[in-house]
């Protein structure tokens, strides 16, 4: 007998349970069957967009199954297997109204629970009377409530991935969703006023239909939030959160890392699922690197935000852009030796030690990769993965300029420098230039990239500072690159003709959203030049 679950439940069963009277002699019986849910599949539409096109019944894996008596008490409990099958032994009156309840909560493996916004575990139930020694009960969950079990399955598969990578089960995960519910901050991980958990948009009702933006079937969105959960589990979730866009190249380094890593990890989990849990995927004909967030939960529709972070335009670059961060990691995943195993080692084993001193960013991931001794030379394939997105974590061509007298050639035009040394050692650029007595000069850093925060001094031949500047103008909070943290000395007038030195280092009071590395260009202009500074 195939039964469709009819009640959306918390742990209270009002309207679904009997009166508690035994209507016949007690009988020991065994209930067995399968539990499935109707998943929504997505692909590329004929319009060129992406969205839901069909549905497929999938097993509800490792979920908790309970037998309840007429009074609502749990008399037996078990779990489904990886095919959604269960068998449970219980006792009840041969005519007693009982219920079989399936909770959106794992009974084994990775601990995952899906709750409504009030904190009640979501569940379905169906009534039956034992009547015989064996009872066959198949439960099929359809409609929007199936989305809760899709969330359970997606996060169960993600937990299996993390177990394989990390060598131990992930911490318990709670996700919150309900039809028509709007959690604080929309779909997100964490909540300033809530317990740490994943919160998922539930759309809105139009008449009797659920429409609007609901993410319970958007696997890519669910997996992106799982990436933040993984960061938190490892202990390196340092993102300030807040509004962000895919093409913003001036993001807070911490935010760009967290969002880029989470998008990447969703793709990496899908690639793992394709090998280990192929049946759990909701799309089998699209790149694993494609991220799709549909605008609604209606089958046949679903146009929304989508991008393939493996096929980004070159204009999306630098460690301050979340899309570029995802692309760098995907390059390592697909191209560098070791693939995901080495990424995980750098991330989970070595990055926390770096993050004990510095916030999590693409910089600290790079340092974690270096600590793994996975990079053998600057020409390594791994470095190429960074360079492809113009993330320059390598010495520049002027590395003899660390001290006065280290470099023979004077500055003659624009120069591009990297504030980088191996293993995070402080970088100092001492750049000689010729200046005429009585002539005014403007010296400035500009076109900052990859989170640079510069500090500029002018030195004489003995190393005595003659002028200095940290920030050319008050920088906007949480903004990197360009001119945001540039340095400028508007007027330097030397007392004597000769060689002077522009010394550029990292700011002694660096902003938390900036980095230790990054690049800049230097410009020295005799005044009046007729040119306005590029960084006001």
Image (cartoon, helix red, strand yellow):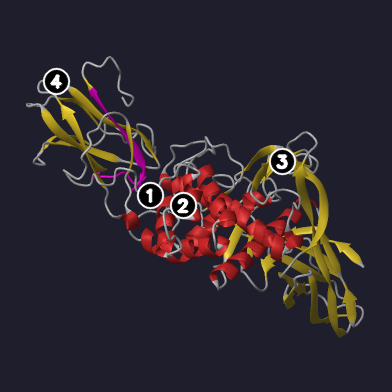
Q: CA distance from mark 2 to mark 1?
A: 8 Å
Q: Which residue is label 2 attached to?
A: 383
What are the residue bounds of the magenta stretch? Answer: 506-525
Q: Which residue is label 3 attached to?
A: 296
Disc 2 residue crowd, few under 14, some 14–19, many 20+, Cα 10 Å = many
Closer to the N terminus: mark 4 or mark 3? 3
The image position of residue 419, as x and y in percent, is 32, 45
Q: CA distance from mark 1 to mark 4?
A: 36 Å
The image position of residue 476, as x and y in percent, is 35, 34
Closer to the N terminus: mark 4 or mark 2? 2
The image position of residue 32, as x and y in percent, is 84, 75
Q: Considering the numbered disc 1 on the image, is that residue within a helix, a strand or a loop? A: loop
Q: Is residue 291 left or right of residue 97?
A: left
The image position of residue 57, as x and y in percent, is 82, 58
- Eye-nearest disc, 4 or 3: 4
Residue 439 - label: 4
Q: Nearer the viewer, residue 236 or 183?
A: 236
Q: Nearer the viewer, residue 285 or 255?
A: 285
Q: Nearer the viewer, residue 10 or 228?
A: 228
Residue pictured at 59% horizontal, 70% vertical: 163
Task: State whether residue 186 appears in this view.
Answer: yes
Q: Which residue is label 1 attached to?
A: 394
Closer to the N terminus: mark 1 or mark 3? 3
């Amino acid at each position: 007998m195939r039964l469709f679950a009819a009640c959306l439940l918390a742990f209270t069963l009002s309207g679904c349970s009997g009166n508690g009277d035994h209507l016949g002699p007690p009988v020991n019986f065994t209930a067995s069957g399968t539990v499935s849910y109707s998943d929504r599949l997505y692909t590329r539409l004929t319009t060129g967009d992406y969205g839901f096109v069909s549905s497929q019944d999938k097993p509800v894996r490792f979920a908790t199954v309970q037998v309840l008596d007429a009074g609502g008490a749990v008399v037996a409990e078990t779990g489904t297997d990886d095919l959604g099958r269960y068998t449970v032994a219980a006792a009840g009156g041969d005519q007693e109204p009982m219920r079989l309840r399936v909770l959106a909560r794992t009974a084994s493996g990775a601990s995952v629970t899906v709750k409504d916004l009030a904190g009640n575990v979501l569940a379905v139930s169906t009534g039956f009377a034992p009547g015989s020694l064996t009872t066959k009960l198949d439960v099929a969950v359809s409609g929007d409530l199936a989305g809760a079990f899709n969330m359970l399955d997606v996060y169960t598969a993600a937990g299996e991935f993390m177990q394989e990578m990390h060598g131990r089960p992930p911490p318990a995960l709670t996700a919150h969703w309900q039809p028509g519910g709007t959690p604080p901050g929309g779909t997100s991980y964490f909540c300033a006023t809530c317990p740490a958990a994943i919160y998922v948009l539930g759309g809105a009702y139009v008449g009797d239909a659920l429409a609007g933006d609901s993410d319970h079937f958007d696997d890519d969105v669910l997996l992106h939030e799982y990436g933040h959960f993984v960061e938190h589990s490892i202990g390196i979730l340092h993102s300030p959160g807040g509004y962000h866009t895919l093409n913003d190249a001036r993001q807070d380094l911490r935010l760009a890392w967290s969002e880029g890593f989470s998008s990447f990890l969703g793709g990496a989990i899908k690639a793992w699922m394709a090998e280990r849990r192929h049946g759990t995927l909701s799309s089998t004909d699209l790149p694993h690197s494609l991220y799709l967030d549909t605008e609604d939960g209606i089958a046949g529709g679903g146009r929304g935000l989508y991008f393939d972070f493996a096929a980004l335009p070159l204009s999306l670059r630098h460690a301050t852009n979340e899309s570029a961060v995802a692309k760098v990691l995907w390059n390592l995943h697909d191209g560098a030796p070791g693939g995901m195993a080495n990424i995980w080692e750098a991330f989970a084993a070595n990055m926390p030690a770096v993050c004990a001193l510095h916030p999590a960013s693409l910089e600290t991931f790079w340092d974690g990769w270096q600590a793994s001794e996975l990079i053998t030379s600057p020409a390594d394939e791994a470095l190429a993965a960074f360079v492809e997105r113009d993330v320059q974590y390598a010495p520049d061509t002027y590395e003899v300029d660390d001290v006065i007298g280290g470099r023979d050639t004077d500055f003659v035009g624009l120069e591009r420098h990297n504030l980088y040394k191996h293993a995070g050692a402080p970088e100092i650029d001492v750049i000689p230039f010729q200046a005429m007595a009585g002539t005014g000069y403007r010296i400035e850093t500009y076109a900052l990239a990859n989170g640079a925060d510069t500090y500029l001094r002018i030195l004489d031949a003995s190393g005595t500072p003659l002028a200095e500047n940290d920030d050319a103008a008050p920088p906007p909070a949480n903004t990197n690159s360009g001119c945001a943290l540039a340095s400028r000395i508007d007027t330097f007038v030397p007392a004597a003709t000769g060689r002077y030195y522009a010394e550029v280092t990292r700011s002694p009071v660096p902003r938390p959203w900036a980095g230790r590395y990054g690049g800049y260009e230097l410009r020295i202009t005799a005044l009046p030049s007729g040119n306005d500074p590029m960084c006001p």
